Amino acid sequence: MIRAVMPPASAASLARPPLIAAALLALATLLVFAPGYAQYDTVSQFGQVLSGAFDDWHPPAMVQLWTWLHPLGRGTTPMFAVQVVLYWAGLGLIAAALPGRRRQAGVLALGASPLFLGWQVVVLKDAQMIAAAIAATGLVAAFQLRGRAAPIAAVASAALLFLYALLLRANAVFALAPLIAALTPIGGIVRRVAVTVAITAAVLAGSQTINHRVIGSAQSGVEKTQPLFDLAGIAARSDATSDTGLLPSQVAQLRQRRCVSPFFWDPLGEPSHCADVIALLNALPSRQLYVRLASAVLHHPLAYARQRLSHWNVTERWMVPAGMPSDAPPTDDEPNDVGLAPPGRIAAPWQRLAAALAATPLGWPIAWLAAAVLLAWAIVLKPDATPIGSTRRRLALGLLASAIALEASFLFVSIASDLRYHLWPMLATGVAALVAPRPEIGRRGVVIACIVASAVILPGVAARTLLPVAPATYQAMLRWDAGAIALLNN
């Protein structure tokens, strides 16, 4: 009996099914969700595209790209197509470079999950950042995970995509600098930390030059929102006046009108609510505001800690009431008069499923942060001497460092609590779990993981059970009495 000997499958043939599946998923996304959902920020940015007048309240790089693409399609269509194609291309490239059908399918299933895809079909800077960052990662990882050096064309394309992603959010550098360092073949941890610091410094120093001098956007005063938010919070929690620049009567107004919200800065900026209370403070130059904030933090560290921790608790969706807004992706467009139209009715059930998942611990950024820390700890404890195993380990740790660093940055740099701000850390953690070599956790590791999960989930469930349900409308949120979680009282 003669047995036929089959030649081993080539790398290209093994890679083909995930890439085909990713292409089909991209096509399905385009067909079901076109032309993408438009929220308030989307409408505002499209207005800038139509007028040709840019400011920096929203990322000028996104408006500039939209301006270039606008002749190719109506409304949100071209930007929607870009972010869908980049998103699935990046996930497909990563999946195709991984061993085993389960890991490959896991990456694509993660990308297709309603919680992630439901937000990825909204034309926003956050979805654009995710698409650009995951595509850039996939371009480099596709070669590195196969033990090959990425060609110059792939590196140059990835660099351009990372630059775009870095310009889309003020805090994007905290997420992407460690990931870029992990993808750079430069040696040990010390060099990677140095690269991370260098990228962070360069982006913080150069982003304003790109936004204002290269792109030509006008200054909107958006850089003032962070110090105004924290100065008002410190004053409301400590009666600080000389250090914050607010008069005693203004501090009393902050409390009486409930201007300081752990959920977002909006009550302070809303003309009909509290903008008049901080008008004199808002008139100061941004540099002077940051100097004043530094002085207030130095003299009132406990008030500042309570201000930041109360906001971090809310933005992490931890010990908060049930019904917190801004976690579910939209099922319709923001009302507008610029011609933006929503997807068809077939898309709405998917968005409602995403909303249901967002209400579970899967929609709690704090749960993903805990998972990222535990996974990073397990990977560090298990070195891998094989070249491919070491590469997978390095990429997984880079993704986890990206997730952890961005979540940690919200302790200091954040003024709003939308779930979309956390989607990149959540997705990066999920991809890292599928990229990493299988860790040997052991009984002790399982016990620690269970303790951490209980410490995160049980207080969150208790808060949602015991606290009054959060307001359902924007206007009600502006006047929300969030004392139970805001730590407003002395």
Image (cartoon, rainbow, N blue to C red):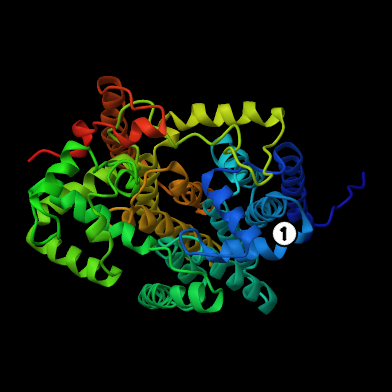
Label 1 element class: helix
Residue 64: quadrant of the picture: bottom right
Using the rendered image of the protein, determine whether residue 277 is visible from the camera's viewpoint.
yes
Up the image or down, 294 lies above or below 334; here it is below
Residue 70: give x, y in percent of width and height.
Answer: 72, 59
* Relative horizontal placement of residue 195, taking residue 117 as reference (left or right): left
Q: How many numbered marks have been drawn onto this rendered protein structure?
A: 1
Residue 37: quadrant of the picture: top right
Q: Nearer the viewer, residue 371 or 28?
A: 28
Up the image or down, 291 lies above or below 475; here it is below
Q: Nearer the viewer, residue 235 or 380?
A: 235
Location of mark 1 (residue): 70
- Where's the N terminus, which quadrant? top right
Up the image or down, 213 lies above or below 266; here it is below
* Relative horizontal placement of residue 350, taking residue 319 as reference (left or right): right
* Relative horizontal placement of residue 483, taking residue 454 as reference (left or right): left
> What's the residue at 14%, 46% (across, down)?
236
- Direction right: furthest residue: 1
> What's the residue at 49%, 58% (across, down)?
58
Residue 360: give x, y in percent of width and height.
Answer: 43, 29
Residue 120: quadrant of the picture: top right
Using the rendered image of the protein, determine whether residue 149 is visible from the camera's viewpoint.
no
> What's the residue at 34%, 46% (across, down)?
271
Q: Could you classify mark 1 by the number of other residues whose Cα lies within 10 Å: few (under 14), some (14-19), or many (20 or more)? A: some
